[in-house]
Amino acid sequence: MSKTSIYGLTYDQLQDWLMEHGQKRFRAEQVWNWLYKKRIGSFEEMKNVNKDTIELLTENFVLHTLDEEIRQESKDGTIKFLFKLEDGNLIETVLMRFHYGLSVCVTTQVGCNIGCSFCASGLLRKSRDLTSGEIVEQIMNVQKHLDAMGKDERVSHIVVMGIGEPLDNYDNLMKFLYVVNDDKGLNIGARHITVSTSGLAHKIYDFADTDIQVNLAISLHAPNNELRTSIMKINKAFPIEKLMKSVEYYLEKKNRRITYEYIMLRDVNDHKEEALQLAKLIHNHRHLAYVNLIPYNTVDEHIDYQRSDSTSIQIFFETLKEQGINCGVRWENGADIDAACGQLRSKQIKKTKAV
């Protein structure tokens, strides 16, 4: 049987596993501290852990399942990592620098089946879900890169917005969230973590019922069914009415602000008419809503889509503001590298096939 990543275990799961294998309860805290505080590279580095425990961990778990293939660094400090998994698949992870701290965007699936017609992530269909350990290890690899730079910097924020649909990999997502949020380990605050979904309404209900207070973002991108279905196939299964009903449940349970992601596509969804429709759609919970307008990163394979011009973006923004909607414009990070999510992975796979 192949070994699994130890990063895939929550603290309670690690504690239970160790006790089931004849170890004392306190060993879990020791091991957890070495993993997430001291960020060891091998089990043998755990100096205050007995030999039997180290041998037990070595026989059953691994610390490394991701290998760095490519690292692209932008002038603005953004770093995009291309990691190879043990089965040879490639995923992307991105480190972004903001005034409030260092944020990492993680991937949850190998490929994506959501089928957004403008997105680079969906150029290659989903082949499998990532394990919770593979998702956690993305954070660990970025943090170890920062450690190696010797600047005493730490990952302070996480956005689950990389390749794949996070709520389609729900169980592994939740384990990941509990691991990185644990105050005995990385201790990344729940309010500093955002999970993005294209609108899997049935999973939003589940997410609303959890006890973890992370942020939720909805990739909306259109304010009516006809337009949204034309650019996002997921809208056929979960039309806006069904999606907004799940959002209402989430807001009732959590009473937390929700973010609506809206990519600005020239002459597609960027007219004043769509701005007014969007304002009407979220009007009833506008005090708990924030619209994030995102200038589109062009993708070679999607030549039909272009970035909205600055005038259209400004008019859209001002229209939402006039309607009492809290909103902002998010300019991209890493504009001088493969900025669009999934672009670097897609290019590398093409190169490999061409050889």
Image: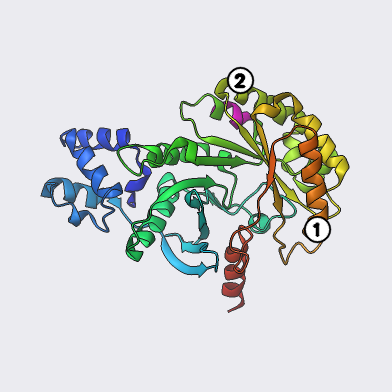
Q: How many marks?
A: 2
| Residue 81, x across and y down, in percent | 49, 63
Give how far apart the Cα atoms at labels 1 and 2 are: 37 Å
Q: Residue at x 70, y 25 (%)?
A: 285
Above or below for 271 versus 11: below
Q: Which residue is mark 2?
A: 252
Pick the front one: 183 or 354:
183
Q: Quadrant of residue 233?
A: top right
The residue under label 1 is which amino acid type? Asp
Q: Is residue 204 magenta?
A: yes
The residue under label 2 is which amino acid type? Glu
| Residue 212, x across and y down, in percent | 46, 30
Q: Are marks 1 and 2 in contact (CB under 8 Å)?
A: no
Magenta stretch: dominant secondary structure:
helix
Q: Residue at x 18, y 56 (%)?
A: 44
Above or below for 32 versus 142: above
Above or below for 42 versus 261: below
Badge 1 marks a residue whose secondary structure is loop
Q: Is residue 147 magenta?
A: no
Q: Residue at x 52, y 62 (%)?
A: 78
Pick the front one: 94 or 22:
94
| Residue 193, x across and y down, in percent | 49, 41
- Magenta part of the chain: 202-206
**In the image as oriented, which residue stretches furthest toward the top?**
252
Q: Judge left or right: residue 52 versus residue 181.
A: left
Q: Residue 264, labelled with which disc?
A: none
Pick the front one: 131 or 182:
182
Q: Residue at x 69, y 36 (%)?
A: 326
Q: Which residue is mark 1?
A: 309
Pick the front one: 312 or 213:
312
Above or below for 89 versus 251: below
Q: Quadrant of residue 342?
A: bottom right
